[in-house]
């Protein structure tokens, strides 16, 4: 798999595309602080809310990229409605959500890349919060920042890298709460699309454990986004999610005894989910 973030590896012929890059050409912001990416497929219900949450940011030094997987509902009509406000958008069939992430990251020009899925929304001051952290940490080797994210049951916050070896609870959220330096993304490479459900965990494992990159998090009350119930991972069979997590751990050379302990513990804890999935 080609790990270079280069869009020519993805772009197909005769794709449907648009945005300010095509309308204004060289007049668009060529060096934004942020590149915000939304990936979508047949989500006419919530996409416009996501778009509006990005466009109304108090901090405006960003570009906005939307990757659509060839939607057949009214998703494309919604995207075209904001053609002059979105920097670039493309609509074509892809190999899934992580393939779409790869396309978006390869298009990015900003110093930091942020992801907001089409089910979720940014708070109005999300980029303002992260920009302040970037400014304050300018002289430190920080590769990524996790912003606090609001879910239906509470707030996800903090960054605890030691927990990555045995738990998902080491960070806040991949969507609306993850901001990665683009130069660091080039070192990590692409999302591995051989993993259908947990390629984000594989990506974080490479980022934190393999590449030993440094990150930080915002304070609990510095909330960057809202994470809606019923997102991508919630629609996947639990057993498939669980087995792929174990596969990723094994492929990264984690201690087999630790993997067995994780398997036994989570199997007991989630017995009903596994039995009826």
Image (cartoon, helix red, strand yellow):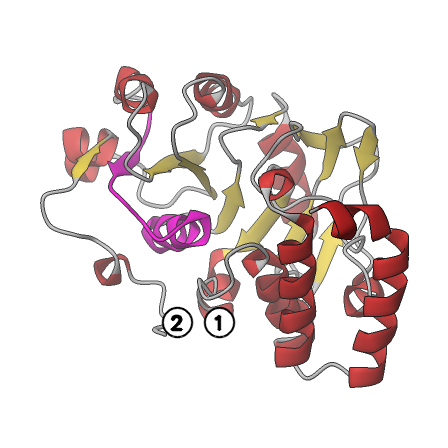
Mark 2 neighbour density, 10 Å: few (under 14) some (14–19) many (20 or more): some
Q: Is residue 41 magenta?
A: no
Q: Which residues are magenta?
A: 86-107
Q: Is residue 172 above or below residue 120?
A: below
Residue where numbered disc 1 is placed: 187
Quarter residue 17 falls in? top left
Q: Is residue 5 visible?
A: yes
Q: Residue at horizontal 49%, vertical 48%? A: 113
CB contact under 8 Å: marks 2 and 1: no
Q: Residue at horizontal 16%, vertical 29%? A: 23
Residue where numbered disc 2 is placed: 3
The picture places residue 31, in percent across and down from the top left corner, at: 37, 46
Mark 2: secondary structure? loop
> Which label sits in the foreground, 2 or 1?
2
Image quarter hosting the N terminus: bottom left
Q: Is residue 213 visible?
A: no
The picture places residue 35, in percent across and down from the top left corner, at: 44, 42
The picture places residue 95, in percent across and down from the top left corner, at: 35, 53
Mark 1: secondary structure? helix
Q: Residue at horizontal 75%, vertical 29%? A: 151
């Amino acid at each position: 798999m080609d790990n270079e973030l280069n869009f020519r590896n993805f772009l197909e012929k005769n794709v449907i595309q648009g945005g300010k890059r095509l309308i204004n050409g060289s007049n668009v912001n060529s060096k934004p602080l942020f590149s915000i990416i939304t990936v979508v497929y047949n989500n006419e219900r919530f996409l416009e809310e996501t778009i509006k949450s990005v466009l109304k940011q108090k901090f405006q030094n960003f570009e906005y990229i939307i990757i659509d997987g060839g939607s057949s509902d009214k998703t494309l009509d919604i995207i075209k409605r904001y053609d002059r406000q979105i920097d670039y958008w493309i609509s074509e069939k892809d190999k899934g959500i992580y393939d779409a992430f790869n396309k978006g990251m390869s298009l990015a020009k900003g110093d930091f890349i942020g992801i907001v899925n089409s089910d979720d929304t940014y708070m109005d001051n999300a980029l303002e919060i992260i920009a302040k952290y970037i400014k304050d940490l300018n002289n430190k080797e920080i590769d990524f920042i996790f912003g606090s994210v609001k879910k239906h049951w509470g707030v996800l916050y903090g960054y605890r890298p030691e927990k990555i070896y045995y738990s998902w609870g080491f960070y806040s959220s991949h969507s609306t709460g993850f901001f990665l330096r683009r130069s660091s993304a080039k070192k990590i490479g692409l999302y591995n699309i051989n993993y259908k459900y947990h390629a984000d965990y594989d990506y974080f494992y490479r980022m934190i454990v393999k590449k030993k990159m440094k990150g930080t998090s915002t304070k609990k009350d510095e909330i960057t986004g809202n994470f809606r119930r019923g997102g991508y991972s919630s629609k996947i069979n639990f057993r498939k999610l669980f087995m792929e997590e174990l596969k990723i751990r094994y492929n990264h050379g984690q201690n087999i005894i630790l993997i067995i302990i994780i398997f036994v513990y989570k199997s007991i804890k989630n017995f009903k989910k596994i039995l009826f999935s």
